Image (spheres, grey):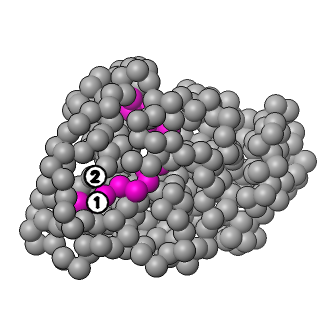
Amino acid sequence: MRVPETMRAVRIAEHGGPEVLEPAEVAVPAPQTGEVLVRVSAVALNNTDLWTREGAYGRPGDPTALSGWRGPIEFPRIQGADVAGQVVAVGAGTDGGLVGRRVVVDPAIYDGQGPHANPVGLMGSERDGGYAEYVSAPAERVHDVTDSPLTDDQLATLPTAYGTALGMIERGRLAEGETVLVSGASGGVGIALVQIARARGAKVLAISSGSKIGSVREAGAHEVLDRARDIAAQIHDAAPEGVDVALDVVAGDLVGEGLPLLREGGRWVIAGALGGYEVTFDVRRLYLHNGQVIGSAMHTPTHFDMLMDLARRAEIHPVVAAAFPLEQAAQAQEELARRGHVGKIIMNP
């Protein structure tokens, strides 16, 4: 396949608001040894895009410091972690049979080579991502999904949202028949949590609000709790014997309110801080009941392999809320920040 020398991309040269997203004509990356070049057909947006652009992650000892996902990032940076597309070229030492295959890229940069390695970096933050016509990636991180019945737009929604959701569910050891609480249930990760937890045979209690409640119920929630009302009282009414696992992307006050509602040996898994990163809770409710608070950042390689198997069999059904052209990246991020949608927002370079 003929690959051009330059491509359209959107990148940031500093932290700031949507105005720092700048269209640019840049060189197409040359795949290095062990890498492939992917022509991007769809790239999904995530809260990580907003927080990386804003520098909102902070650093150990300085929570207000401007920072990317795991520390300072190099500018200019092309954002975009979630890529579906087609392999068009390979670097030295890479299987040429990948050329022409439809793939999803695992965006994580891991701390080792093992199947249970932890992510310590992210495409679109620690290396250039998919807000572009082409992106390079390690060959071991591209997954062949040529035969999946899911569309490219649907496939692009999977890596961060569904990868994060599956990582939370696995780390929380959610089992069939258990009762699970899902916060932020109308977002990309939330919808993924609802779908996967329901497929695992759990009783799903989901927190949402307003016009989104119906969509969350359609995604598989057994009961939807209204965020605008007393959440603790609603949880108690819906699960009087307690919740086995909480899958939480909100944090903030919800942690202190909800921890006393866990059953003996319950697990509270946190993978976000939409409600605030400062948390206060009664630690007695944790240790006296053998509870666990578990941090969960994205997925492991094993989790991602499991996710791609689900995608190949179309056992998950991603919801695409809206699609934008690449040139409207700023508008797409503003739409994401308004949080008025259900599912995922994607762009088509």
Q: Quadrant of residue 42?
A: bottom left
What mark, if any, has residue 46 been given in the picture? Answer: none
Residue 216 in the image: above or below residue 282: below
Residue drawn at point x = 74 percent, y = 35 percent: 257
Which residue is denoted by mark 2 in the rendering?
134
Residue 304 in the image: above or below residue 19: below
Query: Dot 1 lies on which element?
Result: strand
Query: Dot 2 lies on which element?
Result: strand
What mark, if any, has residue 38 been given in the picture? Answer: 1
Q: Give the image location of residue 119, x and y in percent.
A: 35, 52
Residue drawn at point x = 86 percent, y = 42 percent: 234
Residue drawn at point x = 80 percent, y = 54 percent: 217
Q: Give the image location of residue 294, x and y in percent.
A: 53, 50
Q: Is residue 100 left or right of residue 296?
A: left
Residue 128 in the image: above or below residue 263: above
Image quadrant occupied by the N terminus: bottom left
Q: Give the image location of residue 130, x and y in percent.
A: 34, 48
Circle 2: is it few (<14), some (14-19), or many (20+) Cα within 10 Å? many
Q: Is residue 39 left or right of residue 165?
A: left
Instruction: Kindly check if marks 2 and 1 are in contact, taking CB atoms under 8 A apart as contact.
Output: yes
Q: Quadrant of residue 260?
A: top right
Give the CA distance from mark 2 to mark 1: 6 Å
Q: Does residue 50 show up magenta in the picture?
A: yes
Amino acid carrying label 1: it is Val
Q: Give the image location of residue 99, x and y in percent.
A: 25, 73
Q: Quadrant of residue 70?
A: top left
Amino acid carrying label 2: it is Tyr
- The magenta stretch spans which residues? 37-53
Q: Is residue 176 visible?
A: yes
